[in-house]
Image (cartoon, helix red, strand yellow):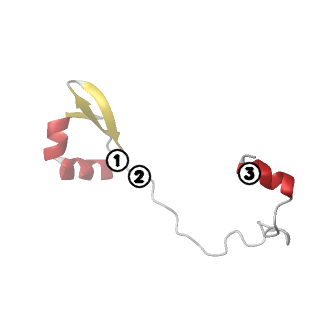
Amino acid sequence: MTVVNVHEAKTQLSRLLARVEGGEEVVIARRGEPVARLVACKPRGKRRPGRLKGKVVIPDDFFDPLPEEELKLWEGR
């Protein structure tokens, strides 16, 4: 783990990001006190349309008007 001060982090950001991409962790400190940590982001998985097909069921009455009592609760009355 590398610790750098704020000024160095601002002037060397591209180099620090390259180190983070290489697996290193970088801590940014202000007056010697750790403030932030630079770590690599986990890559997002590729989205696949229809992945939840058959797993989520929306009832037929989903868009029906709410009963009056429940509507009052949602509206804070």
Q: Label 1 to label 3, Cα distance in Å? A: 48 Å
Residue 51, image x and y in percent? 67, 71
Q: Dot 2 lies on which element?
A: loop
Distance of label 2 from label 3 (alpha carbons): 39 Å
Q: In this view, does 7 lie above or below 23?
A: above
Left or right? Give the position of 18 relative to 39.
Answer: left
* Labels 1 & 2 near each other (Cβ < 8 A): no
Give the Cα distance between marks 1 and 2: 10 Å
Q: Residue at left 86%, top 59%? A: 67
Mark nearest the camera among 1 and 3 is 3
**Left or right: where does residue 7 sit relative to residue 38?**
left
Q: Give the mark, 1 or 2, whose residue is nearer the N terminus.
A: 1
Residue type at numbered disc 1? Gly
**Labelled pair 2, 3 in contact (Cβ < 8 Å):** no
Residue hosting label 1: 23
Q: Nearer the viewer, residue 13 or 22?
A: 13
Residue 40 bears which disc, if any? none
Q: How many labels does the image show?
A: 3
Q: Quadrant of the N terminus?
A: top left
Labels 2 and 3: the sequence-earlier one:
2
Q: Which amino acid does label 3 sit on?
A: Trp
Viewer-side label of 1, 2: 2
Residue appearing at x 34%, y 38% in the figure: 37
Q: Where is residue 41 in the image (x, y as percent from the top left)?
A: 41, 52
At mark 3, the secondary structure is: helix
Q: Residue at x 85, y 69 (%)?
A: 61
On screen, residue 30 versus residue 64, left or right, reads: left
Which circle marks residue 74 in the picture?
3
| Residue hosting label 2 | 41
Residue 70's spot in the image, x, y percent? Answer: 82, 53
Instruction: Establish if 26 lies above or below 14.
Output: above
